[in-house]
Image (cartoon, helix red, strand yellow):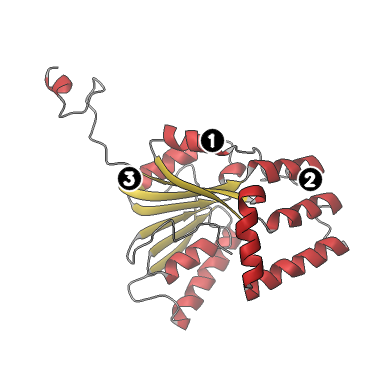
């Protein structure tokens, strides 16, 4: 189940991609299938080992085209182990709501992204997330849990402040919002409640079968109750600034 829409976020074979906070690796796997040179990074060593096993299985099964590469590694989002301008594409999906220093994470992503590169950021949407928080303290008051709820305009403002240029946004996974509301209402760790089990079966059926009816329903509901907010941005090509703050090749700088 992908949150990033690759029809809005084009990926070319050979692009170097960082999936930051990759979790179980869903976006990293898709980028690998599309011929990218992928680095999947997460602080959770157990998940990274599982992602590495899946990368190896995909290679053995011939799921990735020739030239595609994939690496899974542990790392810190606030101190990325890569040189400046290392990646053509950065994806960070459902991660920033967990990190106290979200501005620091944005700064690191901008640092390792090449000028002209693209970035995709997804976070839980404000409205559905507020309902989850209202229904259950356990949903967000856990170690490593959600520490903030973003409004769309707030996230876009932070993206701009980091030096990126947003070019598009949308909402995703409307059918998943009711599931999490049920989870919060009956207990986040209570998977035995009948409404939770029944709705989970519906979601699994939808993911596996992809019926047209639920695809249409989700597209119609995404603007209203989409679980995730997705923003896309580019890193502009900027001239180096002189000490005066004016572009190095500008008349103002030359006059200094």
Is residue 136 visible in the rendered image? The answer is no
Q: Nearer the observer, disc 3 or disc 2?
A: 2
Q: Nearer the observer, disc 1 or disc 3?
A: 1
Between residues 100 and 36, which one lies in front from this camera angle? 36
Disc nearer the start of the sequence (2/1): 2
Q: Are marks 1 and 3 in contact (CB under 8 Å)?
A: no
Task: Name the residue that disc number 2 marks.
Answer: 138
From the viewer's perspective, tell me whether residue 14 is left or right of residue 25.
left
Disc nearer the start of the sequence (1/3): 3
- Count of labels in the image: 3
SS at mark 3 in the image? loop
- Mark 3–mark 2 distance (CA, rounded to whole Å): 39 Å
- Mark 1–mark 3 distance (CA, rounded to whole Å): 28 Å
At which x and y percent is residue 232? 45, 48
At which x and y percent is residue 174? 66, 55
Q: What residue is rendered at 34% in x and 67% in y?
A: 13
Is residue 43 visible in the rendered image? The answer is yes
User: In the rendered view of the protein, which quadrant contains the N terminus?
Assistant: bottom right
Q: Residues within 10 Å of mark 2 (few under 14, many from 20)?
A: some
Question: Is the residue 41 above or below the residue 30 in the image?
Answer: above
Q: What residue is rendered at 64% in x and 60% in y?
A: 218
At which x and y percent is residue 173? 63, 57
Task: Name the residue that disc number 1 marks.
Answer: 153
Q: What residue is rendered at 64% in x and 74% in y?
A: 208
User: In the rendered view of the protein, which quadrant contains the C terminus?
Assistant: top left
At which x and y percent is residue 107? 43, 38
> Where residue 45 is drawn, which disc sits there?
none
> Where residue 84 is drawn, which disc sits there?
3
Q: Nearer the observer, disc 2 or disc 1?
A: 1
- Mark 2–mark 1 distance (CA, rounded to whole Å): 27 Å
Q: Are marks 2 and 1 in contact (CB under 8 Å)?
A: no
SS at mark 2 in the image? loop
């Amino acid at each position: 189940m992908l949150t990033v829409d690759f029809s809005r976020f084009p990926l070319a074979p050979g692009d170097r991609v960082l999936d930051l906070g990759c979790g179980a690796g869903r976006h990293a796997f898709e980028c690998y299938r599309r011929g990218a040179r992928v680095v999947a990074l997460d602080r959770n060593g157990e998940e990274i080992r599982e992602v590495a096993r899946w990368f190896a299985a995909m290679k053995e099964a011939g799921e990735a085209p020739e030239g595609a590469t994939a690496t899974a590694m542990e790392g810190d989002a606030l101190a990325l182990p890569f040189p400046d301008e290392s990646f053509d594409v950065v994806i960070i999906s459902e991660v920033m709501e967990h990190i106290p220093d979200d501005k620091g994470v944005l700064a690191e992503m901008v640092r390792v992204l090449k000028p002209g590169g693209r970035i995709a950021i997804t976070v839980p949407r404000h409205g559905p997330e507020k309902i989850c928080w209202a229904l259950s303290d356990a949903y967000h008051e856990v170690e490593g849990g959600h520490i903030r709820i973003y409004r769309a305009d707030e996230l876009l403002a932070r993206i701009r402040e980091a030096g990126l240029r947003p070019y598009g946004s949308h909402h995703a996974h409307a059918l998943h919002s009711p599931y999490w509301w049920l989870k919060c209402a009956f207990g986040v760790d209570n998977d035995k409640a009948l409404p939770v089990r029944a709705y989970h079966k519906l979601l699994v059926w939808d993911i596996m079968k992809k019926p047209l009816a639920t695809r249409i329903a989700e597209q119609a509901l995404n603007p209203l109750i989409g679980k995730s907010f997705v923003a896309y941005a580019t890193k502009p090509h900027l001239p180096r600034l002189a000490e005066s703050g004016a572009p190095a090749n500008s008349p103002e700088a030359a006059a200094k």
